[in-house]
Image (cartoon, rainbow, N blue to C red):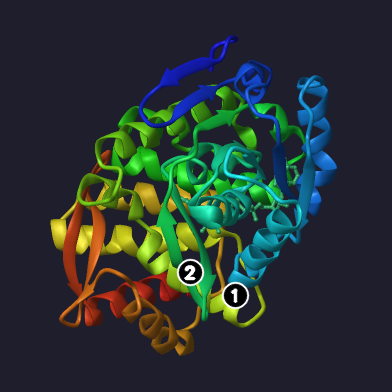
């Protein structure tokens, strides 16, 4: 990332990316009389002071605090936010700010865009995962009845302000989580990014600024082209069809894993599927799996979990006539979507994951 932030004034969202982005967002914020900020207890502690320090002239009307964690990405929390907005008599000309990771931008974007048929909101992502992925692209929503992102809508923020200053307090496990999505861009569309990362553990990476900027711009490019996920945007789901089932499974057993851990396991299974379906070079698929292993290690899946994982996948929005549509990689840096895979092969990919690790 260059020293001065990058400004991308795309329609309908403007992006400010890089060191100094936070301060640069002041002009836009000054247009609003009432500003509400949504945080969780961690971003209230670590990120709100940074926000206030960099934007001392911005008056915040009210701070809404919700509990952190995926378990909280639910309708009850959305109702809690709607209640607060109603009690505060927030009108449609107010501005809603999401200051947090993907859980906050997903649920805050959902609450803001449904309250009074929608008030404007701006995302200030504070995790690596949020900066590289979740805050961009207008997907908002909550988990419902044990299924990830079951209820939600596409609603674009006015702006996304990506300033790495927030990352100073991020825990190691959250860096790891975000790294799964960063690797994904390398695999599906950005071979050069993959080569920047290849062979490295996320803890050894020094050039985060460049990497975040690159990943964010990859996502912006895709969502600009296909905002409603009719085509190429589906490529971003690589690793997520199986990954979401794993994430939901653990969440349902009150043993949450990070989004990135689940997606990393999903990417290994889906790399295996890619190699079976597209006959991807075996050395290449091994290289991908090793890189994911280097960063995520062993993940505790067992064969006993497979029926529940496949049941969860059957609820996926992409199931048609007993087959599930996947986004897979044809070769490094090139993904394709709507690849129909039958459930037997999906089960085999999970067995591959489990037995491969059992051999360690
Ligand atoms: N909408 C999308 O397009 C999209 C894309 C990918 C992922 N997601 C969603 O994003 C969510 C995961 O996002 P996440 O990993 O950012 O999770 P998160 O929001 O739960 O944040 C992870 C943890 O880090 C804490 N935290 C956040 N910023 C911090 C900081 N700067 N310093 C210290 N602690 C901080 C949070 O309080 C939380 O405990 C999932 O719900 C996933 O489904 C959405």
Q: Position of residue 272 (x, y in %)?
A: 29, 62
Q: Position of residue 57 (x, y in %)?
A: 79, 19
Query: Secondary structure under badge 2?
Result: strand
Determine crowd level at label 1: few under 14, some 14-19, many 20+ residues with C-alpha closer than 10 A.
some
**Is 26 above or below relative to 127?**
above
Position of 20 compared to 185: left or right?
Answer: right
Q: Position of residue 16 (x, y in %)?
A: 53, 22
Q: Nearer the viewer, residue 51 or 212?
A: 51
Does mark 2's beta carbon lie closer than 8 Å to ligand 1? yes
**Is 39 above or below relative to 319?**
above
**Residue at 36% from the left image edge and 65% from the top image edge:** 241
**Is 249 above or below relative to 119?**
below
**Disc 2, disc 1: CB below 8 Å?**
yes
**Residue at 58% from the left image edge and 20% from the top image edge:** 18
Q: Nearer the viewer, residue 312 or 75?
A: 75
**Residue at 51% from the left image edge and 81% from the top image edge:** 145
Q: Which residue is mark 1?
A: 251
Query: Secondary structure under badge 1?
Result: helix
Position of 173 compared to 205: left or right?
Answer: right
**Residue at 40% from the left image edge and 30% from the top image edge:** 193
Query: How far apart are the two marked residues, 2 and 1, measured between alpha carbons?
Result: 10 Å
Quadrant of the image occupied by residue 84: bottom right
**Is 125 above or below relative to 355?**
above
Q: Position of residue 128 (x, y in %)?
A: 59, 40
- Residue 148 is tagged as 2
């Amino acid at each position: 990332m260059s020293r001065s932030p990058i400004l991308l004034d795309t329609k309908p969202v403007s992006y400010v990316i890089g060191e100094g982005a936070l301060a640069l967002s002041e002009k836009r914020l000054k247009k609003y009389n009432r500003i509400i900020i949504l945080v969780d207890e961690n971003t209230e502690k670590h990120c709100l002071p940074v926000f206030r320090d960099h934007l001392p002239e911005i008056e915040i009307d009210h701070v809404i605090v919700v509990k952190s964690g995926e378990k909280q990405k639910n309708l009850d929390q959305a109702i809690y936010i709607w209640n607060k907005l109603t009690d505060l008599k927030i009108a449609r000309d107010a501005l809603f700010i999401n200051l947090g990771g993907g859980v906050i931008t997903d649920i805050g974007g959902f609450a803001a865009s449904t309250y009074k048929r929608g008030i404007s909101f701006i995302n200030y992502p504070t995790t690596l995962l949020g900066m590289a992925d979740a805050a961009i692209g207008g997907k908002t929503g909550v988990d419902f009845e044990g299924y990830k992102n079951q209820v939600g809508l596409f609603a674009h923020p006015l702006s996304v302000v990506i300033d790495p200053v927030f990352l100073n307090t991020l825990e190691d496990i959250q860096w790891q989580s975000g790294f799964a999505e960063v690797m994904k861009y390398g695999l599906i569309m950005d071979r050069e990014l993959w080569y920047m990362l290849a062979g490295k553990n996320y803890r050894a990476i020094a050039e985060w600024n460049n990497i975040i900027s690159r990943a964010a711009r990859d996502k912006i490019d895709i969502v600009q082209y296909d905002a409603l996920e009719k085509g190429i945007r589906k490529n971003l789901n690589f690793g997520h069809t199986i990954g979401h089932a794993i994430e939901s499974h653990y969440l349902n057993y009150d043993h949450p894993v990070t989004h990135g851990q689940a997606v990393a396991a999903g990417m290994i299974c889906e790399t295996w599927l890619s190699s079976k379906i597209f006959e991807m070079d075996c050395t290449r698929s091994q290289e991908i799996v090793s890189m994911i292993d280097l960063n995520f290690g062993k993940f505790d899946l067992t064969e006993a979990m497979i029926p529940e994982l496949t049941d969860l996948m059957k609820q996926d929005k992409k199931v048609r006539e007993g087959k599930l549509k996947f986004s897979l990689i044809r070769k490094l840096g090139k993904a394709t979507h709507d690849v129909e895979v039958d459930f037997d092969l999906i089960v085999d990919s999970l067995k591959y994951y489990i037995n491969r690790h059992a051999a360690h």
